[in-house]
Image (tube, grey):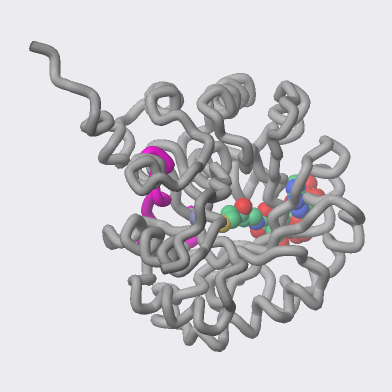
Amino acid sequence: MTRPPTVDIREVGPRDGLQVEAPVDPGDRVRLVEALVEAGVSHVEACSFVSPTAVPAMAGAGEVMAKLSRVSGVTYTALVPNRKGAEMALEAGVDELTVTVSASPAYSEKNVRMSIDESVAAVEEVCVLAGTVPVDAVISCAFGSPYEGDIAPERAAALGDRLVDAGAVSLTYADTTGMATPRRVAELLDETGTEVGLHLHDTRGTALVNAYSALERGVRRFDTSVGGLGGSPFAAGAAGNLATEDFVALLDDLGVVSGIDLERLLAASALAAELVGHPLPSRVAVAGPRDRLAPE
Ligand code: COA
Ligand code: ZN
């Protein structure tokens, strides 16, 4: 068993989570990020610099970054689809950029209105512009899409290689529409090795078991979303991300250090539910931690 002693959780709720919701104003998005940091989250995808016509809920990203108080040891990431987004994000002082390139040609067109080749070229431009700011390339639909069905692990891994050649310092494989299973995670990791991040969605109820299977093989980087918020407005049938609190509860039980305090995280999750105005899918948010006793 190669389970790591610590993991890096990149919290994507303020971006992937909120992008599918009715717009939440920048001040409240900042409150959510700060509640997450208060809970011990040290890596947050805080916003995306994208066309406000394409994703109205992410408008005001510059304002979010300007209002966020900087905390030592906390990394703020922003997703950018192109050069313009990268310029705006760097100007706003982000610590890391994520760029997304799809392994699915159809999703690529829907999401960023670019072919895969055009999108790889955009990553190359973004990496040059980023200079010393690290760029993590997120390969969306890495396990498949509703438009093409399964995508072979060799194909997803080959796209990853191209993105490293384009200048990305790290890779994250995303299961945008919940096509992964533990078997398919293992097949992908056989191609890529375990020095990659995973971004898992729970569309078919497999996010936690997929994360667990990857953890047991030694993967140390995971994207999760508070409350299990999330999805893509550009993929049919996309659902929420792996819930941060569900994963943290599992890690606590295994003795794997995430640095996140579960009770405080649940307070951030309650704030997220209040801001979006509906209950969130996380199981632990509903049931509470295992060691919390029912009132007499
Ligand atoms: N941020 C803000 N505005 C941007 C932008 C960015 N990163 N990139 C382009 N724009 C603006 C352009 O300036 C232009 O504005 P104008 O009409 O006022 O002149 C407008 O958007 C259209 O620009 P164009 O280059 O023709 O883009 P497009 O319409 O082909 O859309 C993207 C391409 C990539 C900008 C758009 O599809 C997008 O933002 N996608 C992101 C989707 C996303 O966030 N998905 C979630 C990831 S899982
Ligand atoms: Zn996602």
User: Does any portion of residue 235 appear in the rendered image?
Assistant: yes
Q: Is residue 160 magenta?
A: no
**Position of 161 compared to 182: left or right?**
right
Horizontal and vertical percent position of residue 269: 41, 29
Residue 25 visible within the image: no
Q: Position of residue 277 (x, y in %)?
A: 37, 26
Q: Answer left or right for 24 relative to 81.
A: left
Q: Looking at the picture, tell me which residue is in the foreground, 184 or 47.
A: 184
Q: Residue at x 75, y 73 (%)?
A: 164
Q: Quadrant of residue 99?
A: bottom right
Q: Quadrant of residue 236?
A: bottom left
Residue lying farthest left?
296
Above/below status of 130 relative to 73: below
Between residues 79 and 106, which one lies in front from this camera angle?
A: 79
Q: What are the residue bounds of the magenta stretch?
A: 233-245
The quarter of the image holding the C terminus is top left
Going by the image, does 29 lie left or right of 84? Answer: left
Q: Residue at x 44, y 37 (%)?
A: 226
Secondary structure character of the magenta stretch overall:
loop
Q: Is 65 or 59 nearer to us in this picture?
A: 65
Q: Is residue 189 above or below residue 231?
A: below
- Count numbered badges in the picture: 0
Question: Which corner quadrant holds the N terminus?
Answer: bottom left
Residue 64 x/y as whole percent: 69, 29
From the top left corner, tell me how far across and down residue 249 is, in percent: 34, 40
Does the stretch in magenta take in 244? yes
The quarter of the rendering in which ligand 1 is drawn is: bottom right
Say which residue appears at 63% left-offset and 25% top-offset. 26
- The residue positioned 80% from the left and 43% from the top of the image is 89
